[in-house]
Image (cartoon, helix red, strand yellow):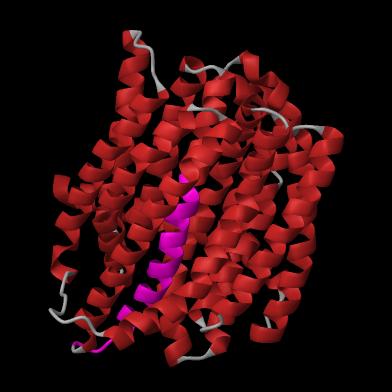
Amino acid sequence: MYNILERVSVLLFGFGSLYFLLRALTKDEFGTWVLFLTTVSFFEVARIGLLQNALVKYLTTSTPEDYPKINTASAVNNILLSIFNVALLLIIAYPLSLLWGPELFQLLLIYTITTIILIPFFQCNFIQQANLDFRGIFYGNFFKQGIFFLWVAYAYFSGWKIELIHLAMLQIATATIGAGVTWFFARPYLRFSKIIDWPWVKKLFNFGRYVFGTNLSAMMYKSIDKLMLGSLLSTGAVAMYELALRITNLAEVPSFSISNMVFPQSARQMASEGKESVKLLYEKSVGAILAMVVPFVLFTLLFPEFIITVIASEKYLDAVPILRLTILFGLFIPFAIQFGTVLDSIGRPKINFYFTLLGAFLNIIFYYIFITNFGVIGAAYGTLTSYGITFVIMQFVLAKELNVQILNTFKYGFLFYGEAYQMITDFLKKKFSEIKTKNA
């Protein structure tokens, strides 16, 4: 529940900020902000890929003697990668500002401070995840995203002119607060060795490098559309497409929430019970996600005009055809995310890396073809085509590695409704019984 609440709160605060920024910024300004966020996301997604899965995998099965060594080794990788990220941000800031606008230069320079502050934020979050304690992850992100939202809302209602540089500076403050909150909850698990165990540094890096590459490829897979729209068309085109994607991202909440819980459980079950239990975990988790996603997809297909008007106002209604296509992404995402999760957990990150790299390569080709021929909506055509091809290949790989049967996911998805109903009724009965007992 903490994990799901964390995802929901991040999306709600993100949507709240989006609501006000769409009204406070011009389309070009909002498009520039989106391109900035997309660029820095590459760096943070890469850091998460190198650190998160490796730390979670080895901490969940570590001995008391190795636990502090693993934490220290992971922290070393975190610091070294962050320094590399800062250097790379300084290098690319000016060329990207020539491509997408001069404001991007200042935004990227400011973010070099934010990325350093995020070192303890991510480290504490990963350590808590490995210990299956999601409280600090929830509260850290809640304050980090919530304060950003409150400032944007206050500035909007106060009639202030919101500048992009103000938003970048605000990120420094919220990252600092978020890091402090997550550290507070992570304290019981922060056991480090005083001496760096370089074999562990190397071991974590070797495992993480494929996830690192996978995450970069996945980010390219999901973001190259916006980058190419900004380069081939305009920042205004990016703004329209981003709006459709933000709505579509709501369908990803169950996928990412469940994947965070599935990974440590899958790693443990692989070590104790073997691949058969991982197969069952994959089929049930995908089924549960689909059960939650499908109603939202259907609602969006039926009422896209209403959704866009509420979120962004009528000036963005030209994004309706784009939304009708992008919402279909939600039907493929559960399979893709859990595919990567289980492959990493059974020690096959290399397959996931090459697979995601293939998807990113296909996206680049399809985006160029469809965007140059159809404009903004071409990006959605390109993604759907890529998803369709990779989905088919994915099922062959899962059948070979884990004997996964795709029809089982739909069976478990249907059964999920009954199980969820039973869980809710049992919970309500328990609460009513407690109330009656207390009143008596």
Furthest toward the top, the residue is 159
Is residue 303 on the magenta stretch?
Answer: no
| Relative height, residue 220 to residue 226 (above, below) | below
Q: Position of residue 148 (x, y in %)?
A: 32, 32
Query: Would residue 322 be visible to someone looking at this image?
Result: yes
Residue 20, x across and y down, in percent: 44, 21
Q: Nearer the viewer, residue 73 or 303?
A: 73
Counting from the top left corner in percent of width and height, residue 233 is at: 72, 30
Residue located 42% across and 28% down the image = 17
Nearer to me, 31 or 3? 31
Q: Compare residues 65 and 368 and report the one nearer the observer.
A: 368
* Left or right: residue 238 compared with residue 68: right
For residue 308, which quarter of the picture? top right
Which corner quadrant of the image does residue 337 belong to?
Answer: bottom right
Quadrant of the image containing the N terminus: bottom left
Q: Is residue 190 left or right of residue 322?
A: left
Residue 129, visible in the rendered structure: no
Is 55 in front, or is 32? Answer: 32
Q: Residue at x 32, y 80 (%)?
A: 201
Please check the rendered image and state whether residue 51 is part of the magenta-colored stretch, yes or no: yes
Q: Say if 54 sits above or below 225 in the image.
A: below
Count of numbered circles on the image:
0
What range of the chain is rendered magenta? 40-64
Q: Relative to residue 46, is residue 294 depicted above or below?
A: above
Q: Main secondary structure of the magenta part?
A: helix
Q: Position of residue 13 (x, y in %)?
A: 39, 35
Residue in view at x 67 percent, y 27 percent: 234
Q: Is residue 147 left or right of residue 219?
A: left
Direction from residue 419 to residue 136 in the image, left or right: left
